[in-house]
Image (tube, rainbow, N blue to C red):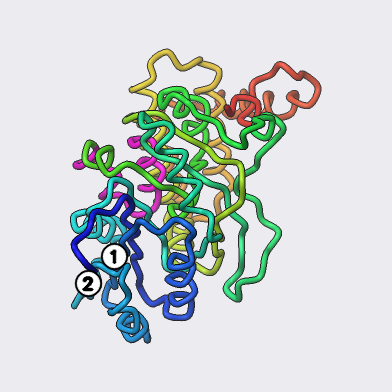
Amino acid sequence: MENRQVEVSVIIPNYNYARFLRQRIESVLSQTYTNFEIILLDDASTDDSVSILNDYRDNKHISHIEINAQNTGSPFIQWEKGIRLARGKYIWIAESDDAAEPIFLEKAVAALNQYPEASFCFIGAHCINEFGNLICKDFDRWTSKQLRHSSGMAVFEGADYIEHNLYWRNYIYNASGAVFQKSCFEQIKGSPCFTMRYCGDWLFWIEMARQGMVIEIYDKLNFFRIHSSSTIANANVLGQGVKEAMQIVSVTEKQLPLMPKCKRRIIHGSFYKEIKRMRVPANIREELLASYRELLQGSRLDYYIERFYKLMAPCLPGLLTRTRDRL
């Protein structure tokens, strides 16, 4: 690729996704917005991935093809490697098992250029299975509150977005749906999110939201592929995913000292409920409850408060819930 200035660096990290890889690369090359470079990364795949990547070596958009000799075991290591190579102002981590509509980048870049104070822009997704067929899952969970925006887009202060959205859950559920400022990423190097195994992406987006405003675009222009994941399965068996999530909530609460107490207790109670309902050995459950008390200073009372809010919310429209609090 000639040494010209590009606005967007598209990083495609891959590990053993040869069966999806060509569709992903073609969906990037088909974008209506064209001022981008593509950085192809492979984390020592054992399938036909490298052969597919090499098929694109002469494409004018490809600036790097980097093949690891050994697997790193961490998506964040690949992200950081790609960003070090990136020349663009904006970064799109286009996961190799996903795809996108041709207009995805055009909309994202236009929004980021319109609001230069924004650290990232997030666009909704259709969910597809391993065969590319649409499935009945909706991770966006937009309500009339989000869809009321006539422009199909909303912009939020980062601190507000954390308190009302990301504190409850990771609404940025798929990295492929986000385009972010490279300069904002540079500000969060050293964050503990990069050493987490299960929930690091949740903390990553919280850290990014602290760097500026957040843009949401209420249009499903991404295709998020749902298929089996042994990492998630192991996280549930060992309870490590829950423990990391509690660590993230604890960190967020320390940085938002004015958080309403009732909101904290609802969140804490939801963790207590989840731990009690997990199908794990008794010793692991006790370890998780000990972490719950240590990290959140939580108690059984929080569980009863969470249950009260959950059961009474349909009868009391003013009662706090995750959906009602969401911006």
The secondary structure that dominates the magenta segment is helix
Three-letter code for the amino acid on which mark 1 is drawn: Ile
Q: Residue at x 44, y 29 (%)?
A: 162
Specify start and end residues of the magenta stretch as a single range: 188-208
Image quadrant where one finds the N terminus: bottom left
Which percent across, then down, holds residue 130? 57, 73
Which percent across, then down, holds residue 77? 24, 58
Quadrant in the picture for residue 67: bottom left
- The local crowd at label 1, few if under 14, some if 14 to 19, many if 20 or more residues have their Cα within 10 Å, is many
**Earlier residue among tags 1 and 2:** 1
Three-letter code for the amino acid on which mark 2 is drawn: Glu
Say which of marks 1 and 2 sits in front. 1
Quick check: 257 above or below 243? Answer: above
- Farthest residue, direction right: 315
**Pick the front one: 29 or 179:** 29
Q: Which mark is residue 39?
A: 1
Which percent across, then down, holds residue 326? 59, 29
Image quadrant where one finds the C terminus: top right
Which percent across, then down, holds residue 42? 29, 73
Q: Residue 203 colored magenta?
A: yes
Q: Residue 179 colored magenta?
A: no
**With 169 as the anchor, is 74 left or right in this view?**
left
**Tag 1 near tag 2, CB within 8 Å:** yes
- Circle 2 is placed at which residue position? 66
Q: What element does badge 2 sit on?
A: strand
